[in-house]
Amino acid sequence: MAWIDSLFKRMVEVGASDLHMTSTLQPMFRLHGDMVPVDGCPVISPTQMKQILMEICPAENKRQYDTDHDTDFAYEIPGLARFRVNFFRDLRGAGAVFRVIPEEILTLEQLELPQSVKDLCYLSKGLVLVTGPTGSGKSTTLAAMVDHINKNRADHIITIEDPVEFVHKDHKCLINQREVGNHTNSFKRALRAALREDPDIVLVGEMRDLETIEIAIETAETGHLVFGTLHTTTAPSTVDRIIDQFPSDRQEQIRTMLASSLKGVVAQTLCKKKPKGRVAALEIMIVNSAISSQIREGKTHQIASTMQMGVKLGMCTLNDSLERLVKNGLVEPDEAYIKAVDKEGFSSKMAGLGIQVKLGQDPGGPPRPQAAPMPHQELNLAHQMDAEPQAPLPSEPAANQEPMAAPGMGDPFERFKNRRKI
């Protein structure tokens, strides 16, 4: 067992979403949205950190890390979870961030996603985008949508990811999952090849560059259903981001193509839930004839108004979603205000409810979550480092240790933890 495996087990046990490893600092969990140190785990020196990280790094990624100073891959502990891994270097030395990917794929119902999102899974062609900041749960939502298709349609699905995160089993669909770096050189190369592989549905893990975006739009126009992700926070900004990727002399053409191919955008933002956990605020845009015309004519500033009138179609703005979470007592008003993009509009909604946003004041809520203490023992690796003392190895919590409080009901990590019963 690798040294870091004990931290991964503890990570899943307490319901943390990420593990941050930084040289000269204690390891830290992201727990319910907050960064908390792993109590009892020591400060790790740069030399120790590199030794710890290289123990689980594939040979090809070691070469890439030595050359480029960062690398991405997936690491799996059978029976526990998969982890999305990024190694990097900074001023302190070697570092890494690990995102937990539960073995069990949550369903659309478990994620409490609305019917309008489920309806997007039954499209025969077009482009569907799931957007949001890093760590907002885009991969979890996409995995749930692919899983729903897998159980209800008989199609061929190709996923292009970096790295492969959720591993899908074949149910009614045939699923080919390709990893950039291992199975293909790039997203754009794999996407071009997908057109010759008889797909019905193509999932593009990240639409990173102009060429990838262009091929994805062309693929959607040629009669395929394409799912993709972008790092945008609202539906109108997603449209603008795609168009702005192209030179000005091509933007009119892209507007026309996007107006006919884009079918929906799900923009999600994770908020801290009361008292613990996290819950997603969703902005949902279903492209109807009005929105299609606004995209074609370059009037994206009018999309938000059209979305407010499209509630019957399942549309919802971010402010409306945040307001609903506050009214239902799931999110503090100041947390919702921080996550809002249109802060003036959100403040007006809160004023209408008689709620005052008080940023920077103690709301009197529960204290900041802390990771439970972790006893440790001495590190024992085959390759010892003579120049550095050995880092203590985190081990299992003591039998009489009080367990962590469960995350909130809206947190997918809670459901995963309860199912594993670790």
Image (cartoon, rainbow, N blue to C red):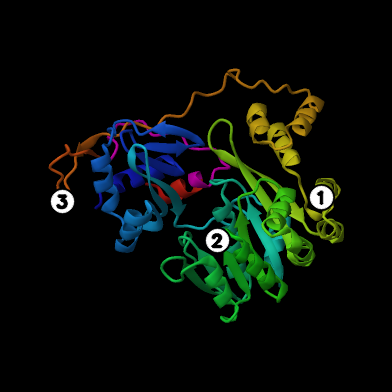
The answer to whether marks 1 and 2 mark residues whose Cβ atoms lie closer than 8 Å is no
Q: Quadrant of residue 58?
A: bottom left
Say few, some or many: other residues with alpha carbon within 10 Å of mark 2 (under 14 / 14 to 19 / 20 or more): many
Would residue 200 be found to the left or right of residue 158 on screen? right
Q: Which residue is mark 1?
A: 303
Three-letter residue code for mark 2: Gly
Magenta span contains residue 398: yes
| Residue located 72% across and 42% down the image | 318
- Residue 215 vs 264, above or below: the answer is below
- Label 1 Cα neighbours within 10 Å, binned few <14 / some 14-19 / many ≥20: many
For disc 2, the marked residue is 205
Q: Residue 383 — which label? A: 3
Sequence-earlier tag: 1 or 2: 2
| Magenta-colored stretch includes residue 35 | no
**Relative height, residue 333 to residue 283 (above, below):** above
* Separation of residues labelled 1 and 2 (CA atoms): 26 Å
Q: Which residues are magenta?
A: 394-414
Residue 159 in percent (x, y) is at 54, 68
Q: Position of residue 34 (x, y in %)?
A: 49, 33
Q: Residue at x 58, y 81 (%)?
A: 196
User: Going 49% across and 69% down the picture, which residue do you hit?
Assistant: 177
Element type at mark 1: helix
Left or right side of 405 for 293: right
Which residue is more in the foreground, 148 or 182? 182
Question: Circle 3 sits in a helix, a strand or a loop, which is it?
Answer: loop
Which of the pair 411/217 is nearer the observer? 217
Q: Position of residue 326 (x, y in %)?
A: 69, 32
Give SS at disc 2.
loop
Q: Amino acid at mark 3?
A: His
Q: Main secondary structure of the magenta part?
A: loop
